Amino acid sequence: MIIIPARVASNRFANKVLADIKGLPMVVATAKRVEEIDEVVIATDSEEVVQVAKKYDIKAVMTSDIHKSGTDRINEAASILGIGSDEIIVNVQADEPFIEPEVVESIYNRVNQAIREGESFMMVSCYKRIESSFADDPNHVKVVVDHNDNAIYFSRSKIPYDRQEHHDYLGHLGVYGFTRKSLEKFCTLGVSPLEDIEKLEQLRALYFGKKILMVEVESRSFGIDTKEDLKRALEIFV
């Protein structure tokens, strides 16, 4: 199942999940990008978003308005929906209306591989190679990985520091895959100091010593965090 967390409140771009994307509200555009892969549900704290989803025949569930992260929100939605402990859940951020379906499919494939390999806890995400100038933007999260493509750290800062500036940076895409039981485990860990400082929920797993398995993908998509991002995205994806 694909669950899209959709919070209306946003410090950088209020009501962005309802911003117009070529005639569709952003969260709806995102849902329609991935609806051929698996069942899609929107998890929200807004009755307005529920009604918008209903208009476009997309399932939505109301969740608490106190969640610290989108992953906590989809965990509540999974409980409401009665999803089984071994079922795969993919969290696609509502601000990724141009995400390629192939990216989301790669997350499913990596979770299935981890299941076959007997991983007890799995959290899977992905990255793409980005230019130095793009990495300068703190709204676009960077990741460093080890030789097994497990995440070492995520940051809004430009990491790793490159003294010679001829290094490709790895840009993180906000798509996460779990089994239901791993999602529950993640949400029992509690908010970590690193997560609170960087405002990056994935740092919770690393802080508590959990692996995040990463997949390299090719993608033109990026999360829309500001009105400037939206303007640029609409110029790119004509």
Image: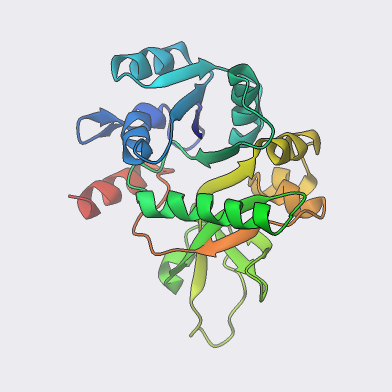
Residue 152 in percent (x, y) is at 70, 65
Q: Is residue 41 above or below residue 137?
A: above
**How many circles with numbers are drawn on the protein?**
0
Q: Nearer the viewer, residue 212 or 181?
A: 181
- The picture quadrant where one finds residue 141 is bottom right
Residue 181 in percent (x, y) is at 72, 36
The residue at 69%/33% (across/down) is 85
The residue at 40%/30% (across/down) is 17
Residue occupying the far left of the picture: 238
Q: Nearer the viewer, residue 170 or 89?
A: 89
Q: Is residue 213 above or below residue 42?
A: below
Q: Is residue 187 above or below residue 236?
A: above
Q: Is residue 115 visible?
A: yes
Q: Nearer the viewer, residue 161 or 61?
A: 61
Q: How is the image coloured?
A: rainbow
The residue at 47%/38% (across/down) is 12
Residue occupying the far bottom of the picture: 164
Q: In the visual, does 85 lie left or right of 38?
A: right
Q: In the visual, does 216 lie left or right of 205?
A: left
Q: Is residue 8 visible?
A: no
Residue occupying the far front of the picture: 116
Q: Is residue 123 above or below residue 14?
A: below
Residue 227 in percent (x, y) is at 35, 41
Residue 119 in percent (x, y) is at 74, 54
- The picture quadrant where one finds residue 133 is bottom left
Q: Nearer the viewer, residue 127 or 155?
A: 127
